[in-house]
Image (cartoon, rainbow, N blue to C red):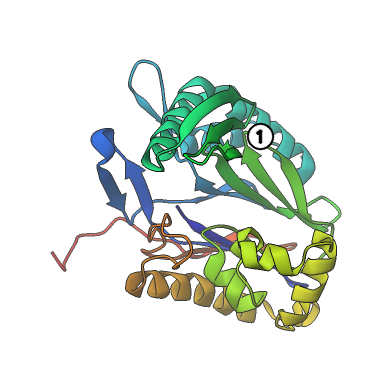
Amino acid sequence: MTLIVNIATYEGIVVASDSKQIQTERNNLVRASENITKIFPINDKVVASLAGLAFFNKPNGQLENVADYIRDYAKTVNDNTTIETIANELYNYILQHYPLESQQTATEENIKAQVAMMGDELLSIQRQNDSIKFKAQDTQGNIKEGICPLQPVDMLIAGYNENNETEIFELTIPGTIQQKRQPNDYGGTWVGQGDVVARLILGYDGRIFANPFFQQKFQGSTQQEVQQQLGLLEYKIPWNTLPLQDAIELAVFLIKTTATIQKYTDSIIGDDHQIAAVGGPIDVVVITPDDGVKWINKKQLHYPENL
């Protein structure tokens, strides 16, 4: 997986990422690297950061790096292109290359394996644009319905428009384009394995909404009402006045803390499917109206003295 943290402040935008990548090979073998670049300048004042699916399996068996698509697209972008235009164009460009059929097949096989492991009978399975819908029956005759999303490419597009207003979009490919932060809406945004960040900042893990006990207790309340109450747990961070250096330190802290907790834990008791996938060097980019995109920390090729 990955963890990308964006923090928009009155002085500039911080974009930070870890460098770890988990790649599933044939026969479910897992290969890990901690030397992956996930932040890509698009023009002088906009960057894209990459999480989720990093390689596309093509019909000929070759792997294509999603990062190459981002770099290719960046060559076509002018400095005056709006962030919204970049988000839409990049979404469509990567979607053209997304291996929809192979991802649908892989997701279907995973659903079949999970249903069989539970001892249930698969009744139906249906492909949708960004997910697989299925229906199963357990040994007591109870019908279960579910939707399993395809493994997406997750991206954050952040920067400044020509009028020097900040804007941040999240791309889920295939899926949606969301404006995460409106012009000059200062605050933190993250994608990837953000459960630790959510607990630290928001005060709760989003997986709480899938907990049956929690659902029963708040039955009759809208999700908006529930989130409004949970919002009282969020730490009060003065985003509007947060100095850029503080934002850098906070972003690095959140990624380091996530990697450290993952080192000593095996997911959560209620969900044992998550693997430790945040780690390695932390790359940091700062974007400001005057200086544009500037690397604060960027891993470099080097001789491995510690081998």
Question: 209 or 292, which is in the foreground?
Answer: 209
Please report the residue visible at 73 percent of the width from the left and 63 percent of the height from the top. Answer: 290
In this rendering, is residue 79 above or below 229? Answer: above
Please report the residue visible at 67 percent of the width from the left and 28 percent of the height from the top. Answer: 92
Q: Is residue 123 among what the camera can see?
A: yes
In this rendering, is residue 202 above or below 158? Answer: below
Residue 174 in the image: x percent, y percent? 62, 33
Please report the residue visible at 70 percent of the width from the left and 81 percent of the height from the top. Answer: 243
Q: Is residue 184 among what the camera can see?
A: no
Please report the residue visible at 75 percent of the width from the left and 62 percent of the height from the top. Answer: 289
Residue 202 in the image: x percent, y percent? 67, 74
Secondary structure under tag 1 reads helix
The answer to whether 243 appears left or right of 127 in the picture is right
| Residue of label 1 | 91
In this rendering, is residue 192 above or below 228? Answer: above
Residue 109 in which image quadrant: top left
The answer to whether 16 appears left or right of 247 in the picture is left
